[in-house]
Image (spheres, helix red, strand yellow):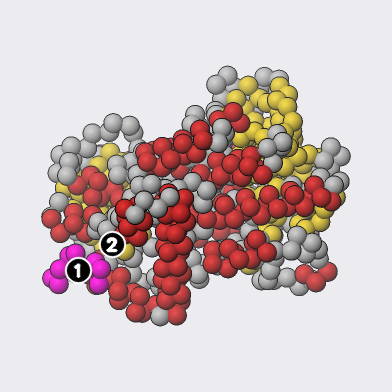
C-alpha cells in the first residue's frame, strides 16, 4: 500500500500492473464516467461540436453510475424525473422512478444520440497528468478485462465521476459489531437475489435510502424496524403530476409537456426553498403535519418525525404515495429513535436499554465521499491536492488547465447543474475556437486579492453526514463570484448563460 503525505491511500499507485502501457490515442475531450452526468456531457459535446473527438471511460461494465451500482429493494429516485431527467429528453413516466426506469431512459438517450460509439466500459482511470509542454492531459487507465494499462492523451478533461466511492458505502464502527451473529448488508453492495423472507430486519439510517428500503421490504420480512438516531423531514405525496397528466390528455407534444412541467416544478421548489429560509417554522409545521395525516393523532410524531435541523439543511426526501408511513401505520414496519449503545450477538442494544433483535441489519448509513474518483492528478509533475484548490463557479479550478468537474445540486436535481455546466463549457469551447486558444485556465486576478476561502459547501446551509465527514478533502470556494459555489439553481440558471467569458479569471492561451 502506498500513502501520500496526508496518509491517504494512493489507489492509483496500488492498481498499476507490471504490463507495459499501450498508447490508446488522442482525444479532444475525455470524459470520466458514464453516469447521468457523463452521458449528458457526451450529448452536449456531440450536439455542439460533432467534429471534436471524444471518448468516455467508465470503470463499470455498463452506464448509469448510481443507478447501476445500487440494487437494493425498492431503489428509486428521490427527486422527480422531469427535473432529474435531461432538459433535452422528455420524461414520459411518473415523477419518481425506479433505477430500472432511469436506466431505460439513459439507454434510450445513448441510443438516440449514437453515444455508444464513444463509451469504453471496464476502463478505470488511475491518473491524469497535465503537460504544459504538450498542452494536454496524459491519462493513465486500465482496461480491466485484461488488466492492460493504457495511456490516452486529451486536450480537455470533463470529470463526470460523481461524488462518492462506488465500490463500498460508509459503515460507522460500533462497539460489539464483531459479536453480532446475524447478517449485515450495506445497501450500496446489496447481494443480487438476496432472500429476506420472514427475517427480522433492522435498517439503520434515516435518509432517503432507509425510507425506501423499509416499505419495499416490509411485506416479505417478519418485521422491519427503522432505527434512526434523529428524525428526517419527509414529504409525502402522490407519485403523479397532475399538470403532466392534463397536458398528456390534451395531446400536447412530449417536448412541451416536459418543459412546462419542469418549469412548474422548479417554480414550486423555488417557493419551498424561499420558505425554508424565510419562514422555516411554518414550513416545518406543514411537513410534520404531512406525517401526522398518515399516522394519526396518537402516533409519537414529536419523537420520530420532528427533526432538529431546519428544513433543507439536509435533502428533503419525497415519499411517493406516503409508502413509508403506510408501512408503519399497518404495523408491518416500525420506527425507533434512539442511540446505538452496542451490537450484541442477537442484535442491537440501545441507549434506552431496549434491545432490537435482528436476523439482518441493513446499514443505510451513507456514502464515502470521493474527490475526483480516486484519480491522482498532477500538473507538470506536481501532485494536485484538491483540498487546497479554489473552485471557479464550482466546476473548474484555479491553476488547473482544461479541466471541469460536474458537481450537481443537493437541494435541486443534480442533472439541472450537469446541463448548465455542459452549456457553459460549450460556450467556452466556442469562444476558444474564435480566439484560436487551445488552453483555458482559471486564475485569481489582482482584484481577487484577499479572497476569503470557505468550505466547498457551507455546513450551516447543508450538512448531511457524508459531506461533513469529508469536507476537509473537498476543494474550497471563495467569498465572492466567480469563485463561489452557491448550490443555487435559481441563481445559476440566469448567471451561467450570461457569464462573461472575458472576466479576466478565465485565462486563454495556446
Ligand atoms: C440511491 C441514490 C439515489 C439518488 N437519488 C437522486 C435523486 O433522486 N435526485 C438527484 O438529484 N440526485 C440523486 N442522487 C445523487 C446521484 O448520485 C446523482 O444525482 C447522479 O446520479 C450522479 O450522477 P453522476 O453521473 O454525476 O455520478 P455517478 O452516478 O456517481 O456516476 C459516476 C460514474 O463514474 C464512474 N467512475 C468513477 N470513478 C471513475 C474512474 N476513476 N474511472 C472511470 N470511471 C469512474 C463510476 O463508475 C460511475 O459510473 C442519488 C444518489 C443515490 C446514491
Residue at 43%, 50% (x, y): give it.
253
Which region of the structure is painted magenta?
Answer: 289-300
Q: What residue lies at 73% left-to-right and 27% top-to-bottom?
A: 25
Residue 67 x/y as whole percent: 43, 41
Give the percent coordinates (x, y) of residue 311.
39, 70
Instruction: Residue 293: give its label.
Output: 1
Picture residue at 33% right of the left edge, 69% below the top: 307
For residue 198, the mark is none
Residue 480 seen:
yes
Which numbered marker is on residue 236? 2
The answer, for residue 230, to whether it is visible in the render is no
Q: Is residue 442 located in the magenta-colored stretch of the structure?
A: no
Q: Nearer the viewer, residue 279 or 1?
A: 279
Q: Position of residue 500 (x, y in %)?
A: 74, 63
Q: As displayed, is residue 105 above or below residue 234?
A: above
Q: Earlier in the sequence, mark 1 or mark 2?
A: 2
Asked whether, in this view, residue 23 is left or right of residue 124, the answer is right
Above or below: residue 500 compared with residue 79: below
Q: Is mark 2 within 8 Å of ligand 1?
A: no
Q: CA distance from mark 1 to mark 2?
A: 10 Å
Q: Is residue 299 magenta?
A: yes
- Expressed as whole percent of the image width and height from the top left, the position of residue 16 reads 64, 28
Instruction: Report crowding for label 1: few under 14, some 14 to 19, many 20 or more residues within 10 A (C-alpha).
Output: few
**Which secondary structure lies at badge 2?**
strand
Mark 2 is surrounded, within 10 Å at the Cα level, by few (under 14), some (14 to 19) or many (20 or more) other residues, namely many
Kindly indicate whether the residue at mark 2 contacts the one at mark 1 (C-beta within 8 angstroms): yes
Amino acid at each position: 500500500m502506498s500513502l501520500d503525505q496526508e496518509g491517504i491511500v494512493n489507489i492509483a499507485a496500488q492498481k498499476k500492473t507490471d504490463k507495459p502501457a499501450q498508447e490508446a490515442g488522442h482525444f479532444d475531450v475525455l470524459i470520466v464516467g458514464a453516469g447521468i452526468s457523463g452521458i449528458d456531457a457526451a450529448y452536449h459535446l456531440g450536439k455542439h461540436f460533432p467534429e471534436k473527438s471524444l471518448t468516455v471511460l467508465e470503470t463499470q461494465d455498463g452506464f448509469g453510475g448510481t443507478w447501476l451500482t445500487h440494487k437494493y429493494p425498492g431503489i428509486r429516485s428521490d427527486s422527480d424525473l422531469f427535473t432529474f431527467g435531461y432538459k433535452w429528453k422528455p420524461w414520459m413516466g411518473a415523477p419518481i422512478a425506479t433505477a430500472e426506469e432511469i436506466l431505460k431512459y439513459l439507454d434510450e438517450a445513448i441510443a438516440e444520440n449514437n453515444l455508444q460509439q464513444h463509451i469504453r466500459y471496464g476502463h478505470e482511470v488511475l491518473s491524469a497528468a497535465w503537460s504544459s509542454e504538450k498542452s494536454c492531459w496524459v491519462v493513465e487507465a486500465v482496461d480491466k478485462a485484461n488488466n492492460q494499462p493504457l495511456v490516452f492523451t486529451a486536450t480537455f478533461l470533463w470529470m463526470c465521476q460523481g461524488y462518492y466511492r462506488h465500490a463500498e458505502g460508509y459503515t460507522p464502527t460500533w462497539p460489539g459489531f464483531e459479536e453480532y451473529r446475524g447478517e449485515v448488508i450495506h445497501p450500496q453492495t446489496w447481494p443480487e437475489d438476496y432472500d429476506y423472507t420472514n427475517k427480522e430486519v433492522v435498517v439503520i439510517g434515516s435518509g432517503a435510502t432507509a425510507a425506501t428500503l423499509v416499505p419495499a421490504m416490509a411485506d416479505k420480512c417478519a418485521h422491519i424496524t427503522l432505527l434512526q438516531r434523529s428524525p428526517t423531514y419527509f414529504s409525502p405525496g402522490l407519485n403523479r403530476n397532475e399538470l403532466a397528466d392534463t397536458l398528456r390528455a390534451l395531446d400536447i407534444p412530449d417536448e412541451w409537456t416536459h418543459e412546462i412541467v419542469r418549469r412548474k416544478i422548479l417554480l414550486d421548489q423555488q417557493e419551498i426553498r424561499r420558505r425554508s429560509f424565510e419562514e422555516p417554522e411554518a414550513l416545518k409545521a406543514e411537513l410534520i403535519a404531512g406525517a401526522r395525516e398518515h399516522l394519526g393523532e396518537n402516533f409519537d410524531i414529536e419523537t420520530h418525525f420532528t427533526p432538529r435541523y431546519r428544513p433543507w439543511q439536509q435533502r428533503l426526501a419525497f415519499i411517493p404515495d406516503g409508502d413509508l408511513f403506510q408501512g408503519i401505520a399497518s404495523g408491518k414496519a416500525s420506527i425507533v429513535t434512539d442511540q446505538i449503545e452496542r451490537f450484541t450477538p442477537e442484535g442491537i442494544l440501545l441507549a434506552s436499554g431496549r434491545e432490537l433483535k435482528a436476523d439482518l441489519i441493513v446499514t443505510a448509513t451513507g456514502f464515502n465521499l470521493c474527490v475526483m474518483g480516486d484519480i491522482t492528478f498532477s500538473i507538470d509533475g506536481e501532485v494536485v491536492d484538491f483540498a487546497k484548490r479554489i473552485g471557479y463557479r464550482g466546476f473548474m479550478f484555479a491553476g488547473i488547465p482544461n479541466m471541469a468537474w460536474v458537481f450537481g445540486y443537493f437541494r435541486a436535481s443534480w442533472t439541472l447543474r450537469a446541463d448548465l455546466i455542459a452549456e457553459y463549457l460549450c460556450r467556452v469551447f466556442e469562444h476558444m475556437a474564435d480566439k484560436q486558444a487551445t488552453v483555458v485556465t482559471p486564475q485569481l486576478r489582482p482584484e481577487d486579492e484577499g479572497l476569503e476561502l470557505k468550505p466547498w459547501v457551507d455546513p450551516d446551509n447543508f450538512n448531511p453526514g457524508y459531506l461533513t465527514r469529508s469536507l476537509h478533502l473537498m476543494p474550497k470556494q471563495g467569498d465572492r463570484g466567480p469563485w463561489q459555489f452557491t448550490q443555487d439553481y435559481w441563481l445559476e440558471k440566469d448567471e451561467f448563460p450570461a457569464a462573461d467569458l472575458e472576466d479576466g479569471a478565465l485565462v486563454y492561451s495556446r
